[in-house]
Amino acid sequence: MRILIVEDEPTLSAQLAAAITAADYAVDVASNGLDGHFMGDTEPYDAVILDLGLPQMDGITVLRKWRATDRRMPVLILTARDGWHEKVAGIDAGADDYLTKPFHMEELLARLRALIRRAGGHASAELVCGLLTLDTRNSRATVAGQVLTLTSHEYRVLAYLMHHRDEVVSRSALVEHIYAQDFDRDSNTVEVFIARLRKKLPAGLIDTVRGLGYRLSSPK
């Protein structure tokens, strides 16, 4: 899953990026509203963390522009402690949730997970497909209760497929959602990750849909 952080305060931005990366997300960062708007308008993100007090273009304007062009990714806005009016404006502009500064990183991560789950129509922090369970709180996958040993990118591929269970996901979509913008992307590595996952998962769980991509299918 791929996250965009739009935050102009360098220390907070670095802390957010480190924590979200450690939680096994791909992370892109913008330090002003113009860059943030462009990235959110041209790249496919699973969620955005958006500060409202940004230089060059404020966060409310960024958000309104995204929603005006039907960009539907979940957006979590960051507001000042006394900025109740900003919270109202942000929600009215199309934000999905808000968090007041200062905040605990654990709460931000929990809200981020919830936004991504809801966007995919999932109610629980645990995603289940037959014997496979993905615990999004701990970035852990198990099969019949046995913990799988996964690399960060294997986990990202599996998490994206689990969030889009029973849907055909193209190779290009996987590339776009498991790598950050500045990563040296190679679509051929997706096939490698899929092959490794198949060795660790129950047989037949991940289908190849010829010419289209991959599908993680619920057991019949």
Image (cartoon, rainbow, N blue to C red):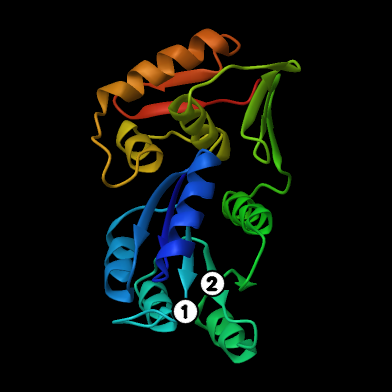
Judged from the image, the secondary structure of the residue bearing numbered disc 2 is strand
- Residue at 45% x, 13% y is 196
Which amino acid does the dot numbered 2 rest on?
Answer: Ile
Q: Earlier in the sequence, mark 1 or mark 2?
A: 1
Q: Which residue was labeled with disc 2?
A: 77
Q: Nearer the viewer, residue 149 or 115?
A: 149
Describe residue 24's horizontal placement relative to residue 85 as left or right.
left
Residue 72 makes an appearance in the image: no
Q: In front: 45, or 7?
A: 7
Examine the rendered structure and indicate whether residue 18 appears above or below residue 52: above
Q: As drawn, which residue projects farthest toward the right?
A: 145
Contact? badges 1 and 2 (CB < 8 Å): yes
Percent coordinates x, y for residue 102 in the rendering: 63, 71
Residue furthest toward the bottom?
A: 85
* Quarter occupied by the C terminus: top right
| Above or below, comparing residue 80 to residue 157 in the picture | below
Farthest residue in the front direction? 11
**Lateral position of residue 205 relative to residue 194, left or right:** right
Percent across and percent down for residue 116 are: 57, 52
| Residue 131, image quadrant | top right
The Cα–Cα distance between marks 1 and 2, rounded to whole angstroms, is 7 Å
Residue located 42% across and 19% down the image:
194
| Disc 2 residue crowd, few under 14, some 14–19, many 20+, Cα 10 Å | many
Q: Is residue 65 visible?
A: yes
Residue 170 locus on image (x, y percent): 35, 34
Residue 118 vertical position relative to residue 214 in the rendered view, above or below: below
Q: Quadrant of residue 217?
A: top right
Q: Looking at the image, which residue is at 43% across and 28% down? A: 153
Q: Amino acid at mark 1?
A: Leu
Which residue is tagged 1? 52
